[in-house]
Amino acid sequence: FVDGIPKENDMEIKIGKIDLLHPPNDDDNNKGFILVKNLYLSCDPYMRGRMRNFHGSHLPPYVPGQALEGFGVAKVVSSSDPDFKPGDFVSGVTGWEEYSFIRKNEQLRKFVPDDDIPLSFHLGLLGMPGFTAYAGFFEVCSPKKGETVFVSAASGAVGQLVGQLAKLHGCYVVGSAGSNKKVDLLKNKLGFDEAFNYKDEPDLEAALKRYFPQGIDIYFDNVGGETLDAVLANMRIFGRIAACGMVSLASLSGPQQMRNLYHIIPKRIRIQGFLQSDYLNLFPRFVEYVTSYYKQGKIVYIEDTNEGLESGPSSLAGLFSGKNVGKQIIRVAHQ
Ligand code: NDP
């Protein structure tokens, strides 16, 4: 298993033949299997959690030596499931390989391509990260018009949509990101009111005080660690924190110092962890909402696409040093 943050050489590319007529370990006579050609794969920070044997995780660890699993957009080649036909487009969990055998599950979705929406958006804006932003912001943060919102990892797959949803809702929104290029995108393309490069701020608590002189009502936390601690000292009373992810902890093994945790008591702060999968009943509403704003030009979405399966290891590892600018995608094949 991987120690610390995943590195490119923790993964390897294997070239081999697979039997497209018979699923591996098929005890069930091919029943329910769908053979897909993978077109796009998604790099997501949670995949790091599957590279270690961590008891607190909600997903099982990867099996060393087997293809990674992750969200992808794919085209059905053949299927013994009557709900899927050759030529159908699907998004859901697939393998990091050219072709995969998959089975129906709650997050495997069939969709009809739309000329105005890139296929890869089903991994970002209209996929799991976009839905995380939607469910986390509206269901966990209980936002009200005019409130102040802070988003970390703000230019990433989830953060960029959180900021835009908050703006559409009438909030004041500030984002933090790890490079000046990302800060520029947040302010000039994604519509955030303000943004800053947290790596240029020696005192995060003071930086937040500058951007939120009256305090923060809502913090959408993608990173945890020092940022969360600095936010706690800047929260307003009855503030809400959506604990979405703690990507900054991927590189750390020792205990974390939370100097400001006591603020949650006098300020009556609500911190709620959540999983997007808790809210899947809202998925159709989310797709309708986001598609409509996207088509009106009121939502934009930035992707960072690398070509070929062989770019997978460096693309995935790059998430943990902030190499990705926007949603990290791997294009495996053209249709
Ligand atoms: P991103 O596209 O934002 O990529 C990860 C980003 O994290 C990097 O680009 C980098 O941006 C930032 N980062 C990396 N290391 C650190 C660090 N040490 N300190 C601060 N920032 C760091 O990823 P996603 O948008 O896909 O995911 C964002 C968060 O949401 C993750 O924590 C993820 O686990 C979580 N998540 C939770 C879900 C849920 O159901 N609860 C579902 C999906 C995602 P920068 O250059 O700005 O530092």
Image: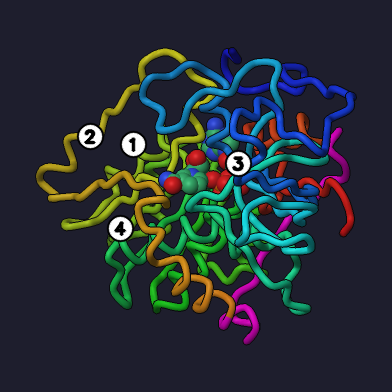
Q: Residue at x 54, y 54 (%)?
A: 128
Q: Pick whichever of labels 4 and 1 is earlier in the sequence.
A: 4
* Local secondary structure at mark 4: helix
Q: Check the picture and name the quadrant holding the N terminus.
A: top right
10 Å crowding of disc 3: few (<14), some (14-19), many (20+) = many
Query: Is the residue under label 1 in contact with that under label 2 (CB below 8 Å)?
Result: yes
Q: Which mark is residue 140?
A: 4
10 Å crowding of disc 2: few (<14), some (14-19), many (20+) = some
Label 4 C-beta lies within 8 Å of the nearest ligand 1 atom:
no
Label 3 C-beta lies within 8 Å of the nearest ligand 1 atom:
yes
Q: Which mark is residue 229?
A: 1
Q: CA distance from mark 2 to mark 4?
A: 20 Å
Q: CA distance from mark 4 to mark 3?
A: 21 Å
Total labels: the figure holds 4
Q: Which residue is mark 2?
A: 261
Q: Pick whichever of labels 4 and 3 is earlier in the sequence.
A: 3
Picture quarter with ligand 1 = top right
Q: Pick whichever of labels 2 and 3 is earlier in the sequence.
A: 3
Give the camera-side residue of 37 and 203: 37
Q: Amino acid at mark 1?
A: Asp
Image x and y of residue 303, in percent = 72, 57
Seen in the image, is 6 located left or right of residue 151? right
Seen in the image, is 51 located left or right of residue 223? right
Foreground tag (1 vs 3): 3
Q: Pick whichever of labels 1 and 3 is earlier in the sequence.
A: 3
Colouring method of the image: rainbow
Foreground tag (4 vs 1): 4
Q: Residue at x 87, y 41 (%)?
A: 308
Q: Amino acid at mark 2?
A: Leu
Q: Can residue 96 be seen in the rendering of this structure?
A: yes
Q: Amino acid at mark 4?
A: Val
